[in-house]
Image (tube, rainbow, N blue to C red):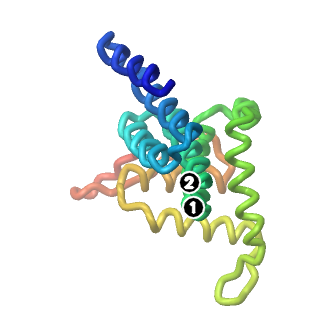
Amino acid sequence: HHGDVEGFADEVDGAGLEEFRLWLRLLLARARAETGDPEGAAVELDAVAVDARAKPDKEREWQALAAAAQAQRLVGAEFVARRCDSQAVEVLESIATRLARQHRDPFWHDARRRAVRDRVNAARNQKSDLSFHGVGLPARAARLLDMLKRLACEHDMERLLERITDSAVELSGAERGLVLLVAADGRIEPRTV
């Protein structure tokens, strides 16, 4: 009863409950995929992910990306699905790195988060012949190369700084990190992300 849910979405807007709008759009798009319109669902889920990133609402962002991956699989777009799953895991990793160390394991034990992470890891394991110019790479070097590729693709400065910090935290095992930038006048400005 897709129309009933859309009517409820209008009521949410009318009642001044805007904070639930992203959540509702996410649910509507997922219902759309389940009722036979995965292409439309994928488009809406991409839009929800973009809006969640702008808010920022990282919880909705990773959920929209993971749901978009499922919708893309329904239409046979496996490559796009893997990319969406990878982006969802990146968002989840950015959330996890901000948690105290003792809360990270329980965070990843959530079945939905674990399922997305497992799909990404399975896809990575299928590419077990990681090499650079024909030379096999140890796991840590391959991970570093993968991080560098992700950093090279980012054009938004804030998101780039966030990814640099998250990557450094992940590689070093630290709980937190910051980036030091040199301002135009030569001052050093710490940027926590």
Q: CA distance from mark 1 to mark 2?
A: 5 Å
Q: Is residue 12 left or right of residue 82?
A: left
Classify residue 54 as left or right of residue 93: left
| Amino acid at pointer 1 | Ala
Identify the residue at the far left of this view: 185
Query: What percent of the width, then of the height, locates residue 89?
Result: 61, 48
Compared with residue 37, is residue 134 higher up or lower down, i.e. above or below? below
Tell me if I can see residue 86 in this picture: no
Q: Are marks 1 and 2 in contact (CB under 8 Å)?
A: yes
Where residue 126 appears, x then y in whole percent?
76, 68
x, y percentage for residue 191?
40, 45
Residue 19 percent location from the top left of the image: 39, 21
Q: Nearer the viewer, residue 147 or 5?
A: 5
Q: Which residue type does callout 2 highlight?
A: Gln
Q: Dot 1, how many residues are within 10 Å of its Cα: few (below 14), some (14-19), or many (20+)?
A: few
Q: Is residue 131 left or right of residue 70?
A: right
Residue 127 numbered mark, or none: none
- In primary-sequence order, the first of circles 1 and 2 is 2
Q: Is residue 165 visible?
A: yes
Helix or strand or loop: what does disc 1 sit on? loop
At 45% from the left and 66% from the top, the residue drawn is: 153
- Which residue is found at the position 77% from the left and 72% from the top? 128
Q: Which residue position holds label 2?
A: 72
* Residue highlighted by disc 1: 77
How many numbered markers are drawn? 2
> Could you tell me which residue is drawn at 63 percent across and 66 percent down?
144
Query: Where is the C terminus found, in terms of image quarters?
Result: top left
Q: Residues within 10 Å of mark 2 (few under 14, many from 20)?
A: many
Q: Nearer the viewer, residue 73 or 82?
A: 73
Residue at disc 2, secondary structure: helix
Q: In the image, is residue 17 above or below residue 165?
A: above
